[in-house]
Each structure stands twice: as structure tokens, then as C-alpha cells.
Amino acid sequence: MAPKSKYKYPLIEVVWVDAETEHGWEEVDEEANLPLATTIGFLIKDQVDKNGNDMLLIASTYADNATNGRFKIPKGMIKEMRILK
């Protein structure tokens, strides 16, 4: 029997490709790379939204039936995800 989690929602780590903006003048042939970001939080929902976007809804905090510090990550940007114990 697997041990019961002490959390209501799974605690996860998500590594994903972030969008980025830059300001100022840059050389046209300068190499462009997207940064990898890491987010750790509680997986509140794994869903398709009303516009058809497949996404994760992660929160930094939950209490009773409310969440705070919500973060939405499109699944197409996710490189890896794991449940933390």
C-alpha cells in the first residue's frame, strides 16, 4: 500500500520552455535561445480550458477551498514533470 500524501494536491516540479522578451538593439545574427524554467507547486488542475488549450494549473499555496499564487503552464511548453514526495 502506497503511503498517503500529507497534501490535498500533488506537489510537483515542472521544467518548461519559457517565452522571453528582450529590449534594446541586438545584432540580427545573434543566436536566440529560449530559457528553461522550473516551477514547483501544487497541481490543482490538469485540464483543457474553454479555448481548447491543454494546461496545468499550479498554485504555491492552498487553504480550505481556495488557492493563491496560481500559475498556468501550457502543456506544449513542458519538457518534464515529476511528483515530489
Image (tube, rainbow, N blue to C red):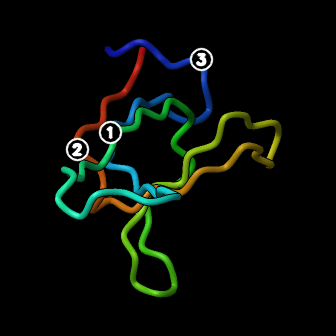
Task: Give the x, y percent position of residue 21.
Answer: 47, 59
Residues at marks 1 and 2 touching, judged by CB atoms closer than 8 Å? yes
Residue 77, numbered label? none
Left or right for 85, reference 59: left
Q: Residues within 10 Å of mark 1 (few under 14, many from 20)?
A: few
Q: Name the one closer to the observer, 35 or 29.
A: 29
The percent position of residue 25, horizontal first and vertical second, equals 44, 60
Residue drawn at x 51%, y 58% as measured from the top left: 24
How far from the left and from the top, in percent, is residue 75?
A: 32, 59
CA–CA distance in space, label 3 to label 1:
29 Å
In the displayed structure, 55 sits above or below 48; it is above
Which residue is identified by label 3?
6
Quadrant in the picture for residue 80 = top left
Looking at the figure, which quarter contains the C terminus? top left
**What residue type is disc 2 on?**
Lys
Query: Badge 3, how many Cα within 10 Å: few under 14, some, many 20+?
Result: few
How many numbered discs sit on the rendered protein? 3
Q: Quadrant of residue 46?
A: bottom left
| SS assignment at label 1 | strand
Are the residues tagged 2 and 3 within 8 Å (C-beta)?
no
Query: Which residue does the image show at 44% across and 66% down from the upper left?
Result: 47
Left or right of 78: which side holds 56? right
Q: Which residue is mark 2?
A: 79
Residue on which the image places disc 1: 36
Q: Earlier in the sequence, mark 3 or mark 1?
A: 3
Q: Secondary structure at mark 3?
A: loop
